[in-house]
Amino acid sequence: MTIRHLEDLNLGGRRVFLRVDFNVPLDGRRVTDDTRIRAALPTIEHILEAGGRLVIASHLGRPKGERKPELSLEPAAALLAEMLGVGEVTLCDDCVGDGPRKVVGDLRDGQVAVLENLRFHPGEKANDENFARELAKLCDVYVNDAFGAAHRAHASVDALPRLMGEKGAGRLLQRELDALAKLRNEPTRPYVAVLGGAKVSDKIGVLEELRQKVDTLIIGGAMANTFLAAAGHAMGRSLVEEDKLPLARALLQKADVGAVELLLPTDLRVADSLESQNPQVVGLDGIDGRMALDIGPESAALFADRVRRAETVFWNGPMGLFEKKPFAAGTLAVAEAMAACPGYAVVGGGDSVAAVQQMNLASKMGHVSTGGGASLEYLEGKPLPGVEALDAD
Ligand code: ADP
Ligand code: MG
Protein backbone atom coordinates (compact mmCIF):
# COMPACT_ATOMS: atom_id res chain seq x y z
CA MET A 1 0.00 0.00 0.00
CA THR A 2 1.32 3.46 -0.87
CA ILE A 3 -0.07 6.52 0.81
CA ARG A 4 1.19 9.82 -0.51
CA HIS A 5 2.22 12.62 1.83
CA LEU A 6 1.23 16.24 1.20
CA GLU A 7 4.70 16.90 -0.20
CA ASP A 8 4.16 14.27 -2.90
CA LEU A 9 1.02 15.96 -4.25
CA ASN A 10 0.81 18.53 -6.99
CA LEU A 11 -1.24 21.26 -5.32
CA GLY A 12 -0.41 24.61 -6.96
CA GLY A 13 -3.28 26.09 -8.97
CA ARG A 14 -5.41 23.01 -8.41
CA ARG A 15 -8.70 22.50 -6.60
CA VAL A 16 -7.87 20.50 -3.47
CA PHE A 17 -10.66 18.73 -1.57
CA LEU A 18 -9.65 18.46 2.09
CA ARG A 19 -11.72 16.19 4.33
CA VAL A 20 -11.25 17.39 7.92
CA ASP A 21 -12.87 16.57 11.23
CA PHE A 22 -14.60 19.82 12.21
CA ASN A 23 -17.13 17.90 14.29
CA VAL A 24 -16.70 20.43 17.10
CA PRO A 25 -18.83 20.85 20.24
CA LEU A 26 -21.23 23.80 19.90
CA ASP A 27 -23.10 25.93 22.38
CA GLY A 28 -25.64 27.55 20.09
CA ARG A 29 -23.47 29.24 17.47
CA ARG A 30 -20.31 29.21 19.59
CA VAL A 31 -17.56 26.60 19.23
CA THR A 32 -16.75 25.56 22.81
CA ASP A 33 -13.57 23.58 21.99
CA ASP A 34 -11.49 24.51 18.94
CA THR A 35 -8.93 21.65 19.25
CA ARG A 36 -10.06 19.92 16.05
CA ILE A 37 -9.92 23.07 13.94
CA ARG A 38 -6.50 23.98 15.33
CA ALA A 39 -5.29 20.44 14.64
CA ALA A 40 -6.09 20.78 10.92
CA LEU A 41 -4.19 24.08 10.53
CA PRO A 42 -0.78 22.63 9.52
CA THR A 43 -2.35 20.82 6.56
CA ILE A 44 -4.54 23.78 5.62
CA GLU A 45 -1.59 26.18 5.72
CA HIS A 46 0.59 23.83 3.67
CA ILE A 47 -2.02 23.58 0.91
CA LEU A 48 -2.61 27.34 0.84
CA GLU A 49 1.11 28.13 0.78
CA ALA A 50 1.55 25.68 -2.09
CA GLY A 51 -1.03 27.73 -4.03
CA GLY A 52 -3.86 25.22 -3.81
CA ARG A 53 -7.49 26.29 -4.23
CA LEU A 54 -8.73 24.75 -1.04
CA VAL A 55 -12.17 23.20 -0.59
CA ILE A 56 -12.74 22.07 3.01
CA ALA A 57 -15.39 19.49 3.90
CA SER A 58 -16.54 17.95 7.19
CA HIS A 59 -19.47 16.42 8.95
CA LEU A 60 -20.92 17.93 12.12
CA GLY A 61 -23.22 16.12 14.52
CA ARG A 62 -26.05 13.85 13.39
CA PRO A 63 -28.42 15.75 11.09
CA LYS A 64 -29.67 12.38 9.71
CA GLY A 65 -29.43 13.36 6.05
CA GLU A 66 -31.45 16.56 6.41
CA ARG A 67 -30.57 20.23 6.47
CA LYS A 68 -30.49 21.31 10.15
CA PRO A 69 -29.51 24.98 10.53
CA GLU A 70 -28.23 24.40 14.08
CA LEU A 71 -25.67 21.96 12.64
CA SER A 72 -24.28 24.37 10.07
CA LEU A 73 -20.50 24.58 9.76
CA GLU A 74 -20.82 28.38 9.84
CA PRO A 75 -19.32 28.82 13.37
CA ALA A 76 -16.40 26.54 12.45
CA ALA A 77 -15.78 28.47 9.22
CA ALA A 78 -15.82 31.77 11.12
CA LEU A 79 -13.29 30.45 13.63
CA LEU A 80 -11.09 29.13 10.85
CA ALA A 81 -11.06 32.58 9.20
CA GLU A 82 -9.96 34.06 12.51
CA MET A 83 -7.16 31.49 12.94
CA LEU A 84 -5.92 32.00 9.38
CA GLY A 85 -5.98 35.76 9.88
CA VAL A 86 -8.17 36.34 6.84
CA GLY A 87 -11.28 38.51 6.95
CA GLU A 88 -13.65 35.80 5.89
CA VAL A 89 -13.81 32.24 4.68
CA THR A 90 -16.64 31.60 2.24
CA LEU A 91 -19.11 29.00 3.47
CA CYS A 92 -21.03 27.40 0.59
CA ASP A 93 -24.75 26.98 1.16
CA ASP A 94 -24.43 23.27 0.43
CA CYS A 95 -21.73 20.68 -0.26
CA VAL A 96 -22.85 19.67 -3.75
CA GLY A 97 -24.69 21.35 -6.63
CA ASP A 98 -24.49 24.67 -8.46
CA GLY A 99 -23.81 26.86 -5.41
CA PRO A 100 -20.54 25.21 -4.37
CA ARG A 101 -19.51 24.77 -8.01
CA LYS A 102 -19.74 28.50 -8.57
CA VAL A 103 -17.87 29.33 -5.34
CA VAL A 104 -15.11 26.79 -6.00
CA GLY A 105 -14.85 27.88 -9.65
CA ASP A 106 -14.19 31.42 -8.48
CA LEU A 107 -11.42 30.46 -6.02
CA ARG A 108 -7.98 31.80 -6.81
CA ASP A 109 -4.67 30.18 -5.84
CA GLY A 110 -4.20 30.20 -2.07
CA GLN A 111 -7.88 30.87 -1.34
CA VAL A 112 -10.21 28.71 0.71
CA ALA A 113 -13.91 27.82 0.82
CA VAL A 114 -15.77 25.60 3.27
CA LEU A 115 -18.57 23.30 2.12
CA GLU A 116 -21.70 22.98 4.24
CA ASN A 117 -22.14 19.90 6.48
CA LEU A 118 -21.70 16.72 4.42
CA ARG A 119 -24.29 14.87 6.49
CA PHE A 120 -27.09 17.19 5.33
CA HIS A 121 -27.20 14.63 2.49
CA PRO A 122 -28.09 10.97 3.16
CA GLY A 123 -25.54 10.00 0.50
CA GLU A 124 -22.66 10.79 2.85
CA LYS A 125 -23.36 8.07 5.42
CA ALA A 126 -24.69 5.71 2.75
CA ASN A 127 -21.32 5.90 0.96
CA ASP A 128 -23.37 6.68 -2.14
CA GLU A 129 -21.35 6.68 -5.30
CA ASN A 130 -23.51 9.28 -7.08
CA PHE A 131 -23.11 11.67 -4.16
CA ALA A 132 -19.35 11.05 -4.28
CA ARG A 133 -19.38 11.88 -8.02
CA GLU A 134 -21.02 15.21 -7.22
CA LEU A 135 -18.26 15.94 -4.69
CA ALA A 136 -15.62 14.85 -7.21
CA LYS A 137 -16.82 17.58 -9.59
CA LEU A 138 -15.45 20.11 -7.09
CA CYS A 139 -11.84 18.96 -7.08
CA ASP A 140 -8.69 17.79 -8.84
CA VAL A 141 -6.81 16.46 -5.80
CA TYR A 142 -8.09 14.75 -2.63
CA VAL A 143 -6.54 14.97 0.84
CA ASN A 144 -7.87 13.26 3.97
CA ASP A 145 -6.91 14.70 7.35
CA ALA A 146 -9.88 13.35 9.33
CA PHE A 147 -8.45 10.45 11.31
CA GLY A 148 -11.48 10.45 13.61
CA ALA A 149 -13.66 9.47 10.62
CA ALA A 150 -11.21 7.06 8.94
CA HIS A 151 -12.94 3.95 10.31
CA ARG A 152 -16.23 4.88 8.65
CA ALA A 153 -17.02 3.93 5.08
CA HIS A 154 -18.76 7.21 4.25
CA ALA A 155 -18.81 8.90 0.83
CA SER A 156 -16.33 11.71 1.56
CA VAL A 157 -13.93 9.26 3.23
CA ASP A 158 -14.32 6.17 1.04
CA ALA A 159 -16.25 6.45 -2.26
CA LEU A 160 -14.83 9.88 -3.16
CA PRO A 161 -11.11 9.10 -2.81
CA ARG A 162 -11.64 5.87 -4.76
CA LEU A 163 -12.79 8.03 -7.69
CA MET A 164 -9.74 10.29 -7.48
CA GLY A 165 -6.44 9.76 -9.27
CA GLU A 166 -4.34 12.05 -7.11
CA LYS A 167 -4.83 11.67 -3.36
CA GLY A 168 -2.96 11.53 -0.09
CA ALA A 169 -2.93 11.95 3.68
CA GLY A 170 -2.80 15.26 5.52
CA ARG A 171 -0.33 15.88 8.34
CA LEU A 172 -2.69 14.91 11.14
CA LEU A 173 -3.71 11.62 9.54
CA GLN A 174 -0.09 10.87 8.69
CA ARG A 175 1.00 11.50 12.27
CA GLU A 176 -1.71 9.20 13.63
CA LEU A 177 -0.78 6.41 11.24
CA ASP A 178 2.94 6.71 12.01
CA ALA A 179 2.30 6.66 15.77
CA LEU A 180 -0.16 3.76 15.77
CA ALA A 181 1.83 1.73 13.23
CA LYS A 182 4.67 1.68 15.75
CA LEU A 183 2.35 -0.05 18.24
CA ARG A 184 0.87 -2.40 15.69
CA ASN A 185 4.06 -3.44 13.95
CA GLU A 186 7.15 -3.00 16.08
CA PRO A 187 6.47 -2.21 19.73
CA THR A 188 9.62 -2.07 21.82
CA ARG A 189 9.25 -4.37 24.83
CA PRO A 190 8.02 -4.46 27.48
CA TYR A 191 4.75 -3.44 25.82
CA VAL A 192 2.01 -2.59 28.30
CA ALA A 193 -1.66 -1.91 27.53
CA VAL A 194 -4.02 -0.29 30.01
CA LEU A 195 -7.70 -0.70 29.21
CA GLY A 196 -10.54 0.78 31.18
CA GLY A 197 -13.68 2.77 30.64
CA ALA A 198 -17.31 1.95 30.77
CA LYS A 199 -17.85 -1.33 28.99
CA VAL A 200 -16.17 -4.56 28.01
CA SER A 201 -18.55 -4.85 25.06
CA ASP A 202 -17.18 -1.65 23.43
CA LYS A 203 -13.69 -3.06 23.45
CA ILE A 204 -13.77 -6.82 22.98
CA GLY A 205 -11.91 -6.64 19.67
CA VAL A 206 -9.04 -4.59 20.97
CA LEU A 207 -8.91 -6.63 24.17
CA GLU A 208 -8.53 -9.87 22.18
CA GLU A 209 -5.91 -8.39 19.89
CA LEU A 210 -3.81 -6.68 22.57
CA ARG A 211 -3.92 -9.77 24.77
CA GLN A 212 -1.86 -11.53 22.13
CA LYS A 213 0.57 -8.68 21.58
CA VAL A 214 1.47 -7.17 24.93
CA ASP A 215 3.64 -8.33 27.80
CA THR A 216 1.31 -6.87 30.42
CA LEU A 217 -2.42 -6.24 30.05
CA ILE A 218 -3.89 -4.02 32.75
CA ILE A 219 -7.65 -3.77 33.16
CA GLY A 220 -9.28 -1.10 35.29
CA GLY A 221 -12.40 1.06 35.35
CA ALA A 222 -15.90 -0.35 35.08
CA MET A 223 -14.49 -2.84 32.58
CA ALA A 224 -12.58 -4.51 35.42
CA ASN A 225 -15.81 -5.08 37.37
CA THR A 226 -16.96 -7.71 34.89
CA PHE A 227 -13.61 -9.49 35.17
CA LEU A 228 -13.67 -9.35 38.96
CA ALA A 229 -17.20 -10.76 38.93
CA ALA A 230 -16.03 -13.52 36.58
CA ALA A 231 -13.27 -14.29 39.07
CA GLY A 232 -15.92 -14.83 41.73
CA HIS A 233 -16.06 -11.53 43.64
CA ALA A 234 -19.37 -10.07 44.78
CA MET A 235 -19.54 -6.73 42.96
CA GLY A 236 -22.61 -5.26 44.71
CA ARG A 237 -24.27 -2.52 42.65
CA SER A 238 -21.17 -1.90 40.50
CA LEU A 239 -21.55 -1.83 36.71
CA VAL A 240 -21.17 -5.45 35.59
CA GLU A 241 -22.05 -6.80 32.15
CA GLU A 242 -23.66 -10.12 32.98
CA ASP A 243 -23.70 -11.25 29.35
CA LYS A 244 -19.94 -10.73 29.10
CA LEU A 245 -19.07 -12.95 32.08
CA PRO A 246 -18.32 -16.04 29.94
CA LEU A 247 -16.03 -13.99 27.73
CA ALA A 248 -14.25 -12.53 30.75
CA ARG A 249 -13.88 -16.01 32.26
CA ALA A 250 -12.38 -17.32 29.02
CA LEU A 251 -9.92 -14.42 28.84
CA LEU A 252 -8.85 -15.00 32.45
CA GLN A 253 -8.20 -18.67 31.68
CA LYS A 254 -6.21 -17.91 28.54
CA ALA A 255 -4.12 -15.40 30.43
CA ASP A 256 -3.43 -18.04 33.03
CA VAL A 257 -1.78 -20.38 30.57
CA GLY A 258 -0.37 -17.74 28.20
CA ALA A 259 2.68 -15.55 28.32
CA VAL A 260 0.80 -12.34 29.11
CA GLU A 261 0.68 -10.85 32.58
CA LEU A 262 -2.92 -9.85 33.26
CA LEU A 263 -3.42 -7.33 36.05
CA LEU A 264 -6.77 -6.55 37.62
CA PRO A 265 -7.39 -4.17 40.52
CA THR A 266 -6.48 -5.55 43.94
CA ASP A 267 -8.43 -2.88 45.82
CA LEU A 268 -11.31 -0.54 45.00
CA ARG A 269 -12.84 2.77 45.92
CA VAL A 270 -16.50 2.18 46.68
CA ALA A 271 -19.49 4.35 47.55
CA ASP A 272 -23.25 4.15 48.02
CA SER A 273 -23.98 6.75 45.37
CA LEU A 274 -22.32 8.53 42.45
CA GLU A 275 -22.61 11.78 44.41
CA SER A 276 -20.74 10.48 47.43
CA GLN A 277 -17.96 12.74 48.73
CA ASN A 278 -16.28 10.17 50.96
CA PRO A 279 -15.67 6.89 49.17
CA GLN A 280 -14.10 4.04 51.06
CA VAL A 281 -11.10 1.94 50.02
CA VAL A 282 -11.84 -1.78 50.31
CA GLY A 283 -10.38 -5.13 49.29
CA LEU A 284 -12.03 -7.14 46.51
CA ASP A 285 -14.38 -8.87 48.92
CA GLY A 286 -15.37 -5.77 50.87
CA ILE A 287 -17.79 -4.13 48.41
CA ASP A 288 -20.78 -5.12 50.52
CA GLY A 289 -23.54 -4.10 48.11
CA ARG A 290 -21.96 -0.75 47.19
CA MET A 291 -20.55 0.44 43.84
CA ALA A 292 -16.90 0.21 42.75
CA LEU A 293 -16.26 3.62 41.18
CA ASP A 294 -12.46 3.76 41.03
CA ILE A 295 -9.46 1.52 41.54
CA GLY A 296 -7.87 1.73 45.00
CA PRO A 297 -4.43 3.17 45.89
CA GLU A 298 -2.66 -0.21 45.95
CA SER A 299 -3.91 -0.98 42.43
CA ALA A 300 -3.01 2.52 41.26
CA ALA A 301 0.55 2.09 42.54
CA LEU A 302 0.87 -1.34 40.88
CA PHE A 303 -0.52 -0.14 37.54
CA ALA A 304 1.62 3.02 37.61
CA ASP A 305 4.73 0.96 38.27
CA ARG A 306 4.16 -1.24 35.19
CA VAL A 307 3.37 1.81 33.05
CA ARG A 308 6.50 3.69 34.16
CA ARG A 309 8.70 0.69 33.33
CA ALA A 310 7.20 0.12 29.87
CA GLU A 311 9.10 0.76 26.67
CA THR A 312 5.79 1.02 24.83
CA VAL A 313 2.45 1.71 26.45
CA PHE A 314 -1.06 2.18 25.09
CA TRP A 315 -3.85 3.48 27.29
CA ASN A 316 -7.56 3.60 26.53
CA GLY A 317 -10.35 4.11 29.03
CA PRO A 318 -10.38 5.84 32.45
CA MET A 319 -9.79 3.83 35.64
CA GLY A 320 -12.92 5.17 37.32
CA LEU A 321 -15.66 7.76 37.29
CA PHE A 322 -12.95 10.41 36.87
CA GLU A 323 -15.42 13.19 36.03
CA LYS A 324 -16.16 13.27 39.77
CA LYS A 325 -13.22 14.27 41.90
CA PRO A 326 -13.63 11.61 44.64
CA PHE A 327 -13.19 8.95 41.94
CA ALA A 328 -10.42 10.51 39.84
CA ALA A 329 -7.33 9.30 41.70
CA GLY A 330 -6.84 6.05 39.77
CA THR A 331 -7.08 7.77 36.40
CA LEU A 332 -4.74 10.53 37.57
CA ALA A 333 -2.17 7.96 38.75
CA VAL A 334 -2.15 6.23 35.36
CA ALA A 335 -1.98 9.58 33.52
CA GLU A 336 0.96 10.70 35.64
CA ALA A 337 2.76 7.40 35.11
CA MET A 338 2.22 7.75 31.35
CA ALA A 339 3.72 11.25 31.52
CA ALA A 340 6.70 9.99 33.54
CA CYS A 341 7.30 6.93 31.35
CA PRO A 342 10.55 7.28 29.39
CA GLY A 343 9.20 4.87 26.75
CA TYR A 344 6.68 5.58 24.01
CA ALA A 345 3.34 6.41 25.65
CA VAL A 346 0.19 6.64 23.53
CA VAL A 347 -3.26 7.55 24.78
CA GLY A 348 -6.43 7.13 22.68
CA GLY A 349 -10.17 7.40 23.29
CA GLY A 350 -12.50 10.33 23.79
CA ASP A 351 -12.81 10.25 27.58
CA SER A 352 -9.24 9.14 28.25
CA VAL A 353 -7.89 12.00 26.14
CA ALA A 354 -10.25 14.43 27.87
CA ALA A 355 -8.89 13.19 31.23
CA VAL A 356 -5.29 13.71 30.14
CA GLN A 357 -6.07 17.19 28.85
CA GLN A 358 -7.96 18.10 32.00
CA MET A 359 -4.90 17.03 33.99
CA ASN A 360 -2.63 19.13 31.74
CA LEU A 361 -0.51 16.11 30.84
CA ALA A 362 -1.19 15.87 27.08
CA SER A 363 2.12 17.49 26.10
CA LYS A 364 4.02 14.86 28.08
CA MET A 365 2.63 11.93 26.07
CA GLY A 366 4.39 10.35 23.10
CA HIS A 367 1.16 10.62 21.15
CA VAL A 368 -2.41 11.65 21.88
CA SER A 369 -4.76 10.12 19.35
CA THR A 370 -7.61 12.30 18.11
CA GLY A 371 -9.67 9.32 16.99
CA GLY A 372 -11.22 7.09 19.63
CA GLY A 373 -13.00 4.50 17.50
CA ALA A 374 -10.50 4.75 14.66
CA SER A 375 -7.46 4.17 16.88
CA LEU A 376 -9.04 1.09 18.50
CA GLU A 377 -10.06 -0.40 15.15
CA TYR A 378 -6.60 0.22 13.75
CA LEU A 379 -4.94 -1.50 16.72
CA GLU A 380 -7.39 -4.38 16.36
CA GLY A 381 -5.80 -4.89 12.97
CA LYS A 382 -8.95 -3.94 11.05
CA PRO A 383 -8.47 -2.10 7.76
CA LEU A 384 -9.65 1.53 7.99
CA PRO A 385 -11.77 2.41 4.91
CA GLY A 386 -10.50 5.99 4.87
CA VAL A 387 -6.91 4.79 4.79
CA GLU A 388 -7.42 1.94 2.30
CA ALA A 389 -9.11 4.37 -0.09
CA LEU A 390 -5.96 6.50 -0.17
CA ASP A 391 -3.89 3.65 -1.58
CA ALA A 392 -2.20 5.00 -4.67
CA ASP A 393 -1.02 1.63 -6.04
P1 ADP B 1 -12.91 6.27 26.21
O1 ADP B 1 -13.85 7.34 25.68
O2 ADP B 1 -11.63 6.81 26.68
O3 ADP B 1 -12.75 5.14 25.22
P2 ADP B 1 -15.07 4.96 27.62
O4 ADP B 1 -16.05 5.77 26.83
O5 ADP B 1 -15.00 3.51 27.36
O6 ADP B 1 -13.61 5.62 27.49
O7 ADP B 1 -15.39 5.09 29.17
C1 ADP B 1 -15.37 6.31 29.85
C2 ADP B 1 -16.43 6.39 30.91
O8 ADP B 1 -16.36 5.29 31.78
C3 ADP B 1 -16.26 7.61 31.76
O9 ADP B 1 -17.44 8.39 31.65
C4 ADP B 1 -16.08 7.08 33.17
O10 ADP B 1 -16.72 7.86 34.15
C5 ADP B 1 -16.71 5.72 33.08
N1 ADP B 1 -16.21 4.81 34.12
C6 ADP B 1 -14.98 4.31 34.26
N2 ADP B 1 -14.89 3.51 35.35
C7 ADP B 1 -16.11 3.50 35.92
C8 ADP B 1 -16.68 2.84 37.07
N3 ADP B 1 -15.94 2.06 37.86
N4 ADP B 1 -17.98 3.05 37.32
C9 ADP B 1 -18.73 3.84 36.54
N5 ADP B 1 -18.26 4.48 35.45
C10 ADP B 1 -16.97 4.32 35.14
MG1 MG C 1 -15.98 7.42 25.58
Image (tube, helix red, strand yellow):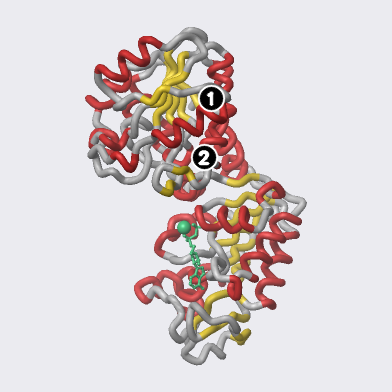
- How crowded is the residue under tag 1: few (<14 C-alpha within 10 Å), some, or many (20+)? many
**Residue contact between numbered discs 1 and 2, judged by CB atoms under 8 Å:** no
Residue 257 in view of the camera: no
On screen, residue 157 above or below 243? above
Judging depth in this view, the residue of 133 and 21 nearest the camera is 21
Q: Position of residue 346 (x, y in %)?
A: 63, 49
Q: Is residue 181 left or right of residue 336?
A: left
Amino acid type indicated by mark 1? Ile
Residue 315 in view of the camera: yes
Judging depth in this view, the residue of 9 and 96 nearest the camera is 96
Q: Quadrant of residue 138?
A: top left
Q: Position of residue 167 (x, y in %)?
A: 45, 20
Q: How many circles with numbers are drawn on the protein?
A: 2
Q: Position of residue 298 (x, y in %)?
A: 69, 78
On screen, residue 224 above or below 346? below
SS for tag 1? helix
Amino acid type indicated by mark 2? Arg
Judging depth in this view, the residue of 183 and 234 nearest the camera is 234
- How crowded is the residue under tag 2: few (<14 C-alpha within 10 Å), some, or many (20+)? some
Q: Position of residue 103 (x, y in %)?
A: 35, 15
Dot label at residue 44 = 1
Q: Which residue is mark 2?
A: 36
For marks 1 and 2 on the same chain, the one whose residue lies earlier in the sequence: 2
Q: Is residue 65 left or right of residue 36?
A: left
The C terminus - image quarter: top left
Q: Is residue 366 left or right of residue 92?
A: right
Q: Residue at x 53, y 82 (%)?
A: 276
Q: Mark 1 to mark 2: distance in Å?
A: 12 Å
On screen, residue 147 above or below 278? above
Q: Residue at x 50, y 78 (%)?
A: 275
Q: Is residue 373 left or right of residue 317?
A: left
On screen, residue 189 above or below 147? below
